[in-house]
Amino acid sequence: MHRAARLDSVPPYLFADIDRKVAELRQRGVDVINLGIGDPDLPTPAPIVEALAAHAADPVLHRYPDYNGHVRFREAMAAYYARRFGVRLDPEREVLGLIGSKEGIAHLTWALAGPGDVVLVPEPGYPVYGVQARLAGAEVHWLPLVAERGFLPDLDAVPDDVRRRARLLWINYPNNPTGAVADRAFLEQAVAFCRAHDIVLASDLAYSEVGFDGYRAPSVLEVPGAREVAVEFFSLSKPYRMTGWRIGAAVGAAEVLDALAVIKTNTDSGQFGAIQMAAIRALQPDLDAEVEAGVQVYQRRRDRVVAALREAGLDPLVPRATFYLWVPTPAGMTAAECATRFLEAAGVAVTPGAAYGPHGEGYFRISLTAPDDRLDEACRRISGALRF
């Protein structure tokens, strides 16, 4: 068999590699606590499951769905944005249904960039941004995210020749993996930058509803002029604990969504209609309390794990959003060495920061998506692994 040459530039997918290592240890009888993947352990709220069950029996929904998403789902998404962010969207032209936001993120790059073009990608960051740019034949220009800047990219440092060829800028706040947040001033700067240089701004808003201590993440579409250059990816995976359901939406600039739709209509046939009906149920105001209940669980876990890691001699950053902890490695240890020790000596899987990009070196990421007793046990094991 001959593999396409484009695959040579693609490393193993980060989380698939973590799953493989965990599975190998478990086959050997090791009790592994997996804190490497952000997959909520809390169940999907019951009203959403009930809606799926009710609609799954409807034969009308057993046929091909609308390519752009069921009109009722797009209307519900627009209503949600109006209620949550004060942004009024045209459900026909400014909302596009997705089979999970990851699918849309990947396809957007193919719709906008190719050989000779540049995609501006933050690092450390979600691996899909850079990998898909390389698969599409585009050049990646990395935007370092460092603690001294609050893990915000320095857009003024992008070289002129890169700006001229740039077609797409990715931002992701609340941020995976660092847990950082962006204020309105940065979003305004990003919109102005993209308007000035004819670049599409893509905002990955997967963690918008997972905010702590009263924090509420803004949408980039709240910025005046953003709808001319920006699209935003909203996922139901994290707030509604629906990672396996694969449902989300891209919203914003109609011209950009038209380009994305060309790729999608030639690649997939849309998400199962019953799942879209269940997503409509999720987006109703009465389920805001279910989302907040989950957030309170993550906030409580954040506080107890931060305290336990500090007791063990580590100094985790305290996030205002997401369900991740971005933790500096112990002195003298690389991210890979730290993750390997925790896995092999303690049976705890964490994600080495360098796997998200060179500026992730010196950190590891912990996901708070495990039951409290398992998090407590993981902290005890990490503490023990650091003592030898």
Image (tube, rainbow, N blue to C red):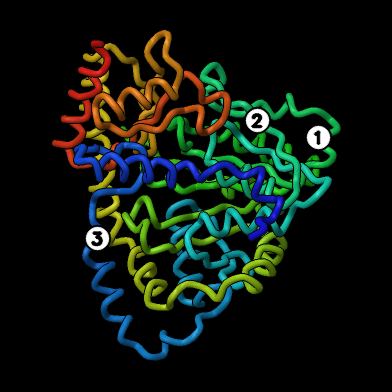
Q: Is residue 198 left or right of residue 336?
A: right
Mark 1 vs mark 3, foreground winner is: 1
- Real-space CA distance between mark 2 and mark 3, rounded to the nearest whole angstrom: 37 Å
Classify mark 3: helix, strand or loop.
loop
What's the amino acid at mark 1? Val
**What residue is rendered at 52% in x and 41% in y?**
126
The residue to which callout 1 is attached is 162
Image x and y of residue 142, in percent: 67, 32
Residue located farthest toward the bottom when viewing the structure as drawn: 59
> Can residue 195 be seen in the rendering of this structure?
no
Classify mark 1: helix, strand or loop.
helix
Q: Are marks 1 and 3 in contact (CB under 8 Å)?
A: no
- Real-space CA distance between mark 1 and mark 2, rounded to the nearest whole angstrom: 12 Å
**Above/below status of 4 relative to 37:** below
- Real-space CA distance between mark 1 and mark 3, rounded to the nearest whole angstrom: 45 Å
| Mark sitting on residue 143 | 2
**What residue is rendered at 68% in x and 47% in y?**
133
Image x and y of residue 140, in percent: 71, 39
Q: Nearer the viewer, residue 238 or 20?
A: 20
**Above/below status of 83 relative to 28:** below
